[in-house]
Image (tube, rainbow, N blue to C red):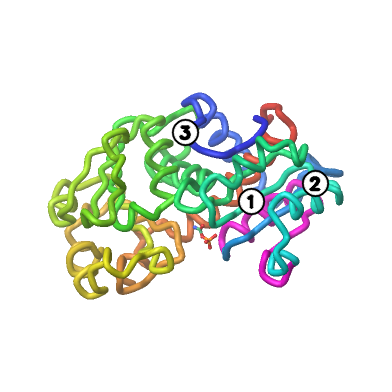
Amino acid sequence: MRHLLSTRDLSRDEAIELLDIAEDMADVQLREVKKLPTLRGRTVVNLFFEDSTRTKVSFEAAAKRLSADVISFSAKGSSVSKGESLKDTAQTLAAIGADAVVIRHGSSGAPLVLAQSGWIDAGVLNAGDGTHEHPTQALLDAFTLRRRIHGSASRGRGLDGVRVTIVGDILHSRVARSNVWLLSTLGAEVNLVAPPTLLPVDLANWPVSVGYDLDDAIDAQPDAVMMLRIQLERMHAAFFPNSREYSRAWGLDDERFARLRADSIVMHPGPMNRGLEISSRAADSPQSSVLEQVANGVSVRMAALYLLLSGEKGE
Ligand code: CP
């Protein structure tokens, strides 16, 4: 694998291979092996033009557990605030010797530009670009689902017939887009539920069913419900019902949570707006996989870095 830019680019076999390598990485960590020597001598640059907690820390931990050197860069406090371009920023970091660049950017397509530009020779991993994609988030979500559903028999398997309902601000969600492509590639049935104003206009091309009523979707008893963060920072005020109305119609509140099957999985990529799209009872319940998703992110990102920088299958 040269770059990881979009889950749309992954075949079923490639996605399953990556999830299986992440299982190997998780096994190694269970054996309390603190570091693998796999990427010794390699340099990973984390290039974050947008805020992040989970993705940034997780990529950093993943690279360090594979013995890579890590350089973490945040646009805030850098020469980006003096007007330095993406090209000059990337080339400056490449001059320091990056083998892989992990990039989060507010503009959809920035990782693709970096990968295709010829400005740098490094592999590029998309850590979230605008409203476009967040491939490693979808991979860690699929990994978490596969483990919850198939347990120790997960290796080699997809998510055939698993019914996943994704709820909320689909319009602005790179997590939703990456999940739609990956989950359907793995054989899952994806249902989107949102206010009509928070759905994209090009849905006809998406492999999903669509609804507007969360109560109907809960009554259909999905295997997993993925609640999305309301992205107030990307929202035009005119398109968003007020928070109370939104929560009443599309929030996973205590009452809706109580109607879910006891083995329905409650997911959220984080950060959560508690009391808006999800109640604390739902988020903190044993059915919730929120913290598992974060923990699994390290194994999945180790697998992605490994595939990018070694190009070989794991042992
Ligand atoms: N899920 C996710 O991308 O979280 P961060 O913004 O904290 O990285």
The residue drawn where x is 75% and y is 46% is 66
Q: Amino acid at mark 1?
A: Ile
Label at residue 98: 2
Q: Is residue 44 magenta?
A: no
Residue segment shown in magenta: 53-78
Marks 3 and 1, Cα distance to the nearest angstrom? Answer: 18 Å
- Element at badge 1? strand
Q: Nearer the viewer, residue 249 or 74?
A: 74
- Element at badge 3? helix
Q: From this view, report whether residue 240 is shown above or below residue 128.
A: below
Query: If the image is split into quadrants, where does the C terminus sit?
Result: top right
Answer few, some or many: residues within 10 Å of disc 3's Cα (few below 14, many 20 plus, some between 14 and 19): some
> Which picture quadrant has residue 303?
top right
Disc 2 + disc 3, Cβ < 8 Å: no
Disc 2 + disc 1, Cβ < 8 Å: no
Q: Which residue is mark 3?
A: 8
- Element at badge 2? loop
Q: Earlier in the sequence, mark 2 or mark 3?
A: 3
Q: Nearer the viewer, residue 143 or 121?
A: 121
Marks 2 and 3, Cα distance to the nearest angstrom? Answer: 26 Å
Marks 2 and 1, Cα distance to the nearest angstrom? Answer: 12 Å
Q: Amino acid at mark 3?
A: Arg
- The spot of residue 180 in percent (x, y) is 37, 40
The residue drawn where x is 40% and y is 44% is 177
Q: Earlier in the sequence, mark 3 or mark 1?
A: 3
Q: Is residue 243 left or right of residue 218?
A: right
- The spot of residue 39 in percent (x, y) is 79, 42
Q: From this view, report whether residue 80 is shown above or below residue 312.
A: below
Q: From this view, report whether residue 83 is shown above or below residue 170.
A: below
Label at residue 103: 1
- The spot of residue 134 in percent (x, y) is 50, 48
